[in-house]
C-alpha cells in the first residue's frame, strides 16, 4: 500500500473516514464502539449525539452512523 492509499472505499459514507480519523483523532473502530454503546438510539439520535458530545460535523457523524448501522465494521 502506498503512503497515501486508504483502506476505505472512495465513494459512499466510508469515503469520509480518512478525514474523520485525522480531524477527530480516533480510529473508525473507536467511533463505531461509541455508536454501538447506544444500541437503542435511532440514526438521527446518534448523529446528534456525535455532534453534541464530540463537536463532529453533520456529514461526518451521518457517514459514521449510516455505515455502522448498515452492519459494516472497521
Image: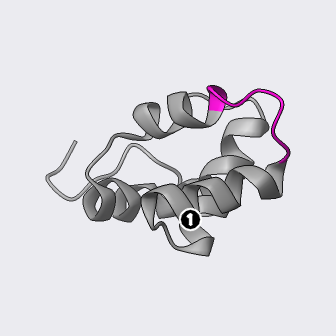
Relative image position of residue 33 (x, y in whole percent): 52, 28
Residue assigned mark 1? 51
Kindly state the secondary structure of the residue where label 1 is placed: helix
**Residue at the outermost left position:** 3
Instruction: Tell me, yes or no, whether the highlighted magenta stretch contains residue 29.
Output: no
Q: Residue at x 18, y 50 (%)?
A: 2
Left or right relative to 67: residue 9: left
Location of residue 62 (image quadrant): bottom right
Left or right relative to 38: residue 19: left
Location of residue 28 (image quadrant): top left
Which secondary structure class fits the magenta region best?
loop
Instruction: Tell me, yes or no, whether the highlighted magenta stretch contains residue 40.
Output: yes
Relative image position of residue 57 (x, y in whole percent): 52, 73
Q: In the rendered view, tell whether residue 52 sits above or below residue 39.
A: below
Query: Is there any visible trace of residue 27 in the rendered image?
Result: yes
Please rate how many residues cluster around mark 1, counting C-alpha atoms within 10 Å: few if below 14, some from 14 to 19, many from 20: some
Relative image position of residue 49 (x, y in whole percent): 63, 54
Q: Residue at x 49, y 63 (%)?
A: 16
Left or right relative to 29: residue 35: right
Q: In the rendered view, tell whether residue 60 sits above or below residue 25.
A: below
Query: Is there any visible trace of residue 74 in the rendered image?
Result: no
Magenta residues span 36-42
Colour convention: one colour
Q: In the rendered view, tell whether residue 57 sits above or below residue 25.
A: below
Location of residue 69 (image quadrant): top right
Count of numbered tags: 1
Q: Name the residue nearer the viewer: 9 or 73.
A: 73
Relative image position of residue 44 (x, y in whole percent): 80, 58
Q: Residue at x 45, y 55 (%)?
A: 17
Q: In the rendered view, tell whether residue 38 sits above or below residue 15.
A: above
Tell me the quarter of the image containing the N terminus. top left
Amino acid at each position: 500500500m502506498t503512503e497515501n492509499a486508504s483502506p476505505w472505499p472512495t465513494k459512499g459514507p466510508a469515503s469520509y473516514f480518512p478525514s474523520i480519523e485525522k480531524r477527530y483523532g480516533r480510529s473508525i473502530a473507536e467511533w463505531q464502539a461509541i455508536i454501538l454503546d447506544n444500541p437503542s438510539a435511532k440514526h438521527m439520535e446518534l448523529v446528534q449525539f456525535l455532534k453534541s458530545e464530540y463537536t463532529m460535523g453533520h456529514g461526518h457523524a451521518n457517514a459514521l452512523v449510516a455505515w455502522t448501522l448498515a452492519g459494516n465494521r472497521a
